[in-house]
Amino acid sequence: MRSNRLAGIMKLALVVGSLQLGSAGIAAADTTILNVSYDPTRELYKDFNAAFAEKWKADTGETVTIQTSHGGSGKQARSVIDGLEADVVTLALEADIDAIAQATGKIPADWKARLENNSAPYTSTIVFLVRKGNPKGIKDWGDLTKDGIQVITPNPKTSGGARWNFLAAWAWARAANNGDDAKAQEYVTQLFKHVPVLDTGARGATTTFVQRGLGDVLLAWENEAYLSLEELGPDNFEIVTPSISIKAEPPVALVDGNVDAKDTRKVSEAYLNYLYSDAGQKIAAKHYYRPFKPELADPKDTARFADLKLVTIDEFGGWKEAQPKFFADGGVFDQIYKPGQ
Amino acid sequence: MALDTSTAPTASSKLVKAATSETRVARLTLIAVALGFVALFLLLPLATVFIEAFRKGPAEFATALRDPETFSAIRLTLIVAAISVPLNLVFGVAASWAIAKFEFKGKAFLTTLIDLPFSVSPVISGLVFVLLFGANSALGPFLQKHGIHILFAVPGLVLATVFVTFPFVARELIPLMQEQGTSDEEAALSLGATGWQTFWHVTLPNIKWGLLYGVLLCNARAMGEFGAVSVVSGHIRGQTNTMPLQVEILYNEYNFVAAFAVAAVLALLALVTLVLKTALEIRYSDEIAASRRH
């Protein structure tokens, strides 16, 4: 039994040792900032962080380590509210940053006006991913409600991306019917009758379409659609760009309360500003995000983005109006969507 | 009476024989069903993990594991297990010792309490710590003022893991110690041993195999826990992602080889513990039989 005790003590020593090693490792880096982001930005920020760290080193001589955390946008906002010490947040929806601002006071209420383009350095839109050769001949929103077409989109109640899908469909129908909202609602009602299953998130819906082979068309973020094309084989899928879609603006914000506590304001501000720079815009375009200033990006990358009419959330009165009207309990979505019909 | 005693053994031996005298076909079918089930539900999924991990060859597998974020996830998982398993070992022994060898008020309640983590969903197990230590909890401002990081850091991961793996050691030991009774300890005490000596030289040797088994189970679960850890992790890459979380991240990034490579390492750690346990069981089979006494 003595050897057991000895082993126990050694184990404990090992633990304490490695813990100290861990904290020493953190202290050795000059500065560390944390970017709390949403799901599809992993590849983008991996590149961007490396570029920024290099630039910061060249400009100031300081070493900066950028940590990132990814997850569903709403869940990530929740974590920051619960105390995750984000220096900057780069989320999918304005409403998620608003939630942090309201719940913690760590972000001022007017955060949106602090950076250019409503604090969205890159934008994206909603496109269609179809099976290779487009066997069902899907070209625009109107084709989605034809007989025998199955549409895959996540649940707007739980997914930020799905809300953009819903509003993009609405925007097309409204334009096609000379601004008639009743007709648009009719179209969207029809559209959701063609949805066999509602996943909870965008990556889940992609898996349903790509791996499980369900449905004829996936309504997806443009950057997600290109990424799955790249990762899962251009031999199996192709992208169809509709005539009208919505301009999705994933915003970024500095978390003032946290950067002041950690004394990282300068580097965090520089980090966000760098997103708007030549290099930042180039990296965004490379990862299939539409840069806010396309003239700064590589023309080869921007040429990949199809030209289409993009409506903004302002045409729905902004998120403050659209969110309760369409997606709250008892809202338009609840009225039109009856499962299994 | 004489008749009774002479017929009793024959009757019972007939009964025993009858219970196992299935036809050859029935026996083979049963064995085939059992083996088929094990192959389909245990071996096949496990094999898939390793096949997927090596799909692009051992070089890709090695590259995937050399990724600094993956490496940090492996390190973090080992650290969390190395802290929470000893904690639960000490607690498990203490609790089962108290429950099996002593009578006290609230014993039934304590036994039920130990089982609590088994019946609570891991997500809830994580959320309780968010509610306890989150920025909006009663403790939150105090922790923040003193710069104490619990949530989204190693302490939070350890707390969640300890909570989830709480019952493993105690659950393994309580029935064993109850079965062994208190006569050995009473003998030791009557021969003049102190309480500590009794524990160290009498109780512990009696339970060491059960204890080892409980610790191995506890360790396997501690390394594999996903739900509770996911809630308190904060998912900071290269810092608070444990191996199961890293597997999910890599899978969601279409990085299938790397995801399965980490999964394979995790499975391997579990397999090593199982092999270790089996090897020890074979090596010390007589001793184990004696200590179990059944």
Image (cartoon, coloured by chain):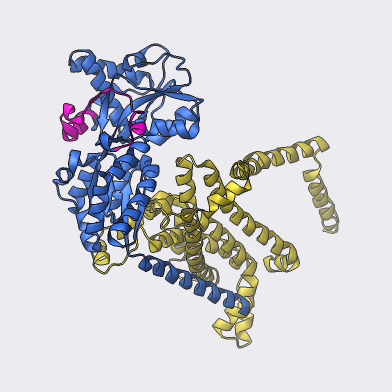
Chain colours: A blue, B yellow
Say if the magenta span includes residue B292.
Answer: no
User: Is the residue B24 above or below the residue B286 in the image?
Assistant: above
How many marks on residues? Answer: 0
- Give coordinates of residue B119: x percent, y percent: 46, 51
- Between residues B99 and B152, which one lies in front from this camera angle? B152
Residue placed furthest toward the bottom: B192
- Give coordinates of residue A80: x percent, y percent: 28, 52
Residue B200 as seen in the image, left or right of residue A338: right
- Between residues A167 and B255, which one lies in front from this camera angle? B255
Q: Give me the residue at 27% from left, 55% from top.
A: A87
Say if the magenta span includes residue A324.
Answer: yes
Q: Quadrant of the N terminus of chain B?
A: bottom right
Residue A323 as seen in the image, left or right of residue A285: left
Regarding residue A334, the answer to whether it shows in the image is no
- Give coordinates of residue A319: x percent, y percent: 19, 34
Q: Quadrant of the C terminus of chain B?
A: bottom right
User: Is the residue A97 above or below the residue B187 in the image?
Assistant: above
Regarding residue B219, the answer to whether it shows in the image is yes
Q: Give me the residue at 22% from left, 40% from top.
A: A95
User: Is the residue B123 above or below the residue A58 in the image?
Assistant: above
Query: In which image quadrant can residue A298 be found?
Result: top left
- Give coordinates of residue A161: x percent, y percent: 32, 33
- Between residues A224 and B136, which one lies in front from this camera angle? A224
Give the extent of the magenta segment: A297-326
